[in-house]
Amino acid sequence: MTALFEGLLVGFGLIVAMGTQNAFVLRAGLRRQHPFTVALVSTLGDVLLIGVGALGLGSLINASDVLRALATWGGAAFLAWFGLRALRSALRGAHSEPDVVAVPTSVRASALTALGFSLLNPHVYLDTVVLLGTVAARHVGMERASFALGASLASATWFFALAYGAARLVPLFERLVAWRVLDGLIAAVMWVLAARLLLSS
């Protein structure tokens, strides 16, 4: 359960930060243009990459002391940097504008675009394959599978909540303080996870 909860926390911490993929899902939900398809494809793309990171790259890193040390320190540095960026965003009140991402009208186009945001986005690879794979490498056997499951559940929960809850979230996030609170929480989670990663090395 600890590994599952950790995977859930890491997954949420990385995915909640507003980016192009989340902006696309949010806009699809706001426009009610195939939100289920967009959320499902986005989730499946994340699950695939999480599996590659946790079961593939994670195993490779865990087999080498040098790679494990580099990945641990690199992962902690990235988490600390990600937390700092979230804190700066909270202090400045900056956030991405969801309306900049256009949503296609057909189901096929929506699915392909969502797949593109999942598989052609270098930040997604960095988050799911490299970073999640690094954290997952600290676990073995069923614990690693539980971690991957937790991260996957975070993706599924977030994408479907974003797609179907968009209309209710818009009034809340029209207030700058909501973005600041969200970014502040993300920063705290990232720094706690960075510390745990270093202390467990």
Image: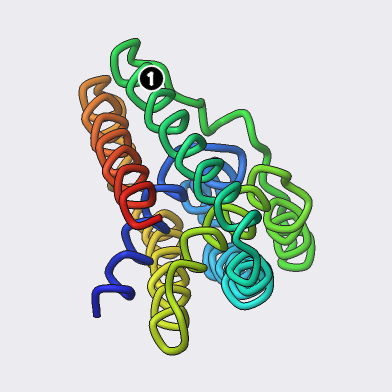
Image-quadrant location for residue 186: top left
> Which image quarter holds the C terminus?
bottom left
Q: Position of residue 152 (x, y in %)?
A: 47, 71
Image position of 68 (left or right of 168): right
| Type of amino acid at the residue the image marks with label 1 | Ser
Identified at 37% across, 60% down, the residue is 161
Image-quadrant location for residue 45: bottom right
Q: Which is nearer the eye, 46 or 144?
A: 144
Q: Position of residue 123 (x, y in %)?
A: 65, 43
**Label 1, on which residue?**
89
> Which image quarter holds the N terminus?
bottom left
Q: Is residue 101 above or below residue 159?
A: above
Image position of 159 (left or right of 192): right
Q: Position of residue 188 (x, y in %)?
A: 25, 36
Outermost residue, bottom side: 142
Q: Is residue 42 above or below residue 188?
A: below
Q: Which is nearer the eye, 47 or 111?
A: 47
Q: Is residue 3 above or below residue 128?
A: below
Q: Position of residue 18 (x, y in %)?
A: 47, 37
Identified at 52% across, 48% down, the residue is 31
Examine the rendering and report whether any part of residue 166 can be seen.
no
Identified at 47% across, 47% down, the residue is 30
